[in-house]
């Protein structure tokens, strides 16, 4: 992230205040993303769930914001340092990342709620054969 920060800084030859602000914001958001990745790696979901989920939110949430900031920077540096194809590709990747993040967090919240309301919530990491089958699962003999 620091290398990208210095690269954009060098490309900003017109000394655009907007690009400078976006670039510094990108560096800050990138550092938050790194902190989130450290939290996810060092605090397992089974042991310290809250810290793990905060880290995951930082990684995925700030990762999408970082991608969006650099998409905006690319549009600002067009046509001197970025092609229209590159900027559109970055925008598409950012959009796909945002959609994937919303789906992932949404399904995780639903799954967490369903498991927490289940009578075997004390053993969250191991499925038991007598656990009830949820919608869409294949039934035996059916």
Image: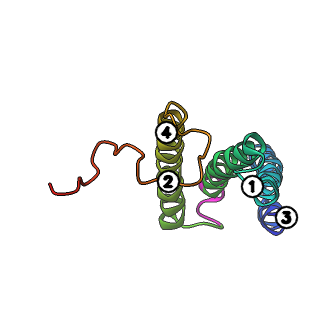
Residue 106 has which mark? 4
Q: Earlier in the sequence, mark 4 or mark 3?
A: 3
Q: Earlier in the sequence, mark 1 or mark 2?
A: 1
Identify the residue at horizontal 47%, vertical 54% (top origin): 96
Q: Are marks 1 and 2 in contact (CB under 8 Å)?
A: no
Magenta residue span: 75-80
Pick the residue in front: 48 or 60. Answer: 48
Separation of marks 2 and 3 at Cα, in angstroms: 44 Å
Q: Are marks 4 and 3 in contact (CB under 8 Å)?
A: no
Pick the residue in front: 18 or 140. Answer: 140
Residue 107: image location, x then y, percent: 47, 43
**SS at badge 3:** helix
Q: Counting other residues with Cα less than 10 Å from the Cα at mark 2, is it few (<14), some (14-19), or many (20 or more)?
A: few
Q: Nearer the viewer, mark 1 or mark 2?
A: 2
Q: Are marks 4 and 1 in contact (CB under 8 Å)?
A: no
Q: Which residue is mark 2?
A: 127
Identify the residue at horizontal 54%, vertical 39% (top origin): 112
Looking at the rendering, in which quadrant would you find the C terminus? bottom left
Pick the residue in front: 87 or 97. Answer: 97
**SS at badge 1:** loop
Q: Say above or below: 67 vs 50.
A: below
Q: Say above or below: 121 vs 10.
A: above
Separation of marks 1 and 2 at Cα, in angstroms: 19 Å
Q: Which residue is mark 3?
A: 2
Separation of marks 4 and 1 at Cα, in angstroms: 20 Å
**SS at badge 2:** loop
Residue 105 has which mark? none
């Amino acid at each position: 992230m620091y290398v990208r920060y210095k690269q954009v800084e060098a490309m900003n030859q017109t000394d655009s205040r907007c690009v400078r602000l976006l670039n510094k914001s990108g560096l800050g958001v990138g550092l938050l993303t790194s902190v989130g990745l450290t939290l996810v790696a060092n605090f397992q979901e089974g042991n310290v769930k809250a810290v793990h989920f905060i880290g995951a939110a930082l990684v995925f949430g700030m990762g999408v914001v970082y991608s969006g900031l650099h998409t905006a920077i690319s549009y600002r540096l067009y046509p001197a340092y970025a092609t229209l194809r590159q900027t559109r590709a970055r925008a598409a990747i950012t959009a796909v990342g945002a959609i994937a993040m919303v789906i992932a967090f949404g399904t995780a919240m639903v799954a967490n709620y369903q498991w927490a309301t289940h009578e075997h919530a004390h053993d969250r990491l191991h499925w038991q054969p007598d656990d009830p089958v949820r919608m869409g699962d294949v039934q035996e003999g059916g």
